[in-house]
Amino acid sequence: MTETGSSSPRHMIASAFVAFAAFGSFWGVWGASVPRVQQQAGITDGELGLALLFVGAGALPAMLLAGRALDRWGLRVAALVIAALGATGVGLALSAVNLASLPIGLAVVGAASGAADVAINAVAGRAEKVTGRPVISWAHGIFSSLVVIGSLTTGLAAAASLPLAVPFMGVAVLSVVAGVSMLKALPAGVAVQGHDGIGATVSSPRARSRIVPLVLIGLLGALAFASENAHQSWSAVFAHNQLDSGMGLSAVAPAVFAGTVAITRFATSGLQATHAHVVLLAGALAAAAGAALIAAAGTLVMAALGLAVAAAGTAVLFPTLVGIVSRNVDEQHRGRATSVVTSVSYLGFLLGPVYVGLWADVVGLRGAMLAVAALGIGLLVLTPALLRFSGFGEPDRHGEAVPAGSDGRHRARM
């Protein structure tokens, strides 16, 4: 059935931005709340590490299911998912009182956040395709900004001895606002081909939705996220252990990284789609160079400079990949396409910190930073080949991918 409703591109963009703000605030609050959650549950570091695996266990299947739900029932599914996200955080804060209850709460949080991740990226991709504006980069910039704000706000709440659930309640309110905004902004029903305008998109020979090409793009996203979360998770530890920074100064490191990511995404949002290939290569090179600079850093200032370079590089990678896919996907397969790319990429997010830890045990933390630099080099080498093999090749003058085959048809079509 055709999408119906009185939505406008402007309202769709605004709803996507509010949703990403809610998503970013959730993860900012969660990241800053982990020590208090551990204390409330009364568990050891090892037990916490095992419990955190349940976030991924809940997220990955939910991501795949969310994509199918979006294609089956329309983008308004995103409104329900984002509205529910904040409630899961409140539930976790109230129920995580021991080792038995914490994994259950984390699995629910993972499922809600994974589904929300796919859903809001699908909405942002739709808005960008309809309007031709850089919605995805701006949305991810808003996400990164709210991660910083959420973290700092949660720190203040903890310093004021407010209950653990209070910051999550704030996120819950914002999540409901985002859900209501999205419900009003998005058209009802599902898209069909053959109509112009916001209700549906015109069928194009460049449309694609088959799994293998999307998995290849997801592999690039996994390398990008592995680098990003490696720095986000280990930068404070590096500053404290390798540079003898105090706990206060060490905490500045992840804030520098997240802040630079946000600024970079806003600053590069105006780049045209025709530059996507160059942006990916430049981002991979900067990610590698930044990690190498961190490995060689002898002072906190030098490490912060390396973090800024690495952050600027990783910041552009995933939004650019999502944008490439979004511009070249059939509307009726947008949910599944987004879910495949996001799910494969999310594996890198989960494994990045583990990758650093394994290397650190063998060659030390500085050597592990060189291993992170190797991820950037790998991305630099693999990007041209995987874009070509996937069919998402160099963009043409209209910003769409040049067909992979000489007959003008993409091999990635379903």
Image (spheres, rainbow, N blue to C red):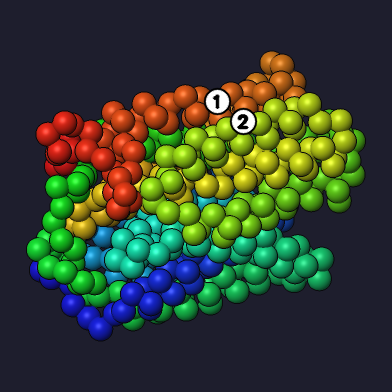
Q: Position of residue 395 (x, y in %)?
A: 33, 44
Residue 51 location in percent, x, y?
57, 42
Say whether marks 1 and 2 touch (CB < 8 Å): yes
Q: Does residue 199 appear in the picture of this structure?
A: yes
Outermost residue, front direction?
A: 397
User: Going 30% across and 53% down the picture, which residue do you hit?
Assistant: 398
265, 274: nearer the viewer: 274
Point out which mark residue 254 bears. Answer: none
| Left or right of 365, for residue 175 | left
Residue at 48 percent of width and 54 percent of height: 271
Q: Residues within 10 Å of mark 2 (few under 14, many from 20)?
A: many
**Number of dots carrying numbers:** 2
Q: Quadrant of the N terminus?
A: bottom left
Residue type marked 1:
Ile
Specify few, some or many for label 1: CA neighbours under 10 Å numbering under 14, 14-19, or 20 or more: some
**Residue drawn at x 12%, y 61% as measured from the top left:** 193
Circle 2: residue type: Ala
- Left or right of residue 248, residue 172 in this image: left
Residue for badge 1? 377
Helix, strand or loop at label 1? It is helix
Q: CA distance from mark 1 to mark 2?
A: 6 Å
Q: Which residue is mark 2?
A: 288
Residue at the far top: name it.
Answer: 362
Q: Nearer the viewer, residue 309 or 235?
A: 309
**Where residue 97 sits in the image (x, y, percent)?**
63, 56
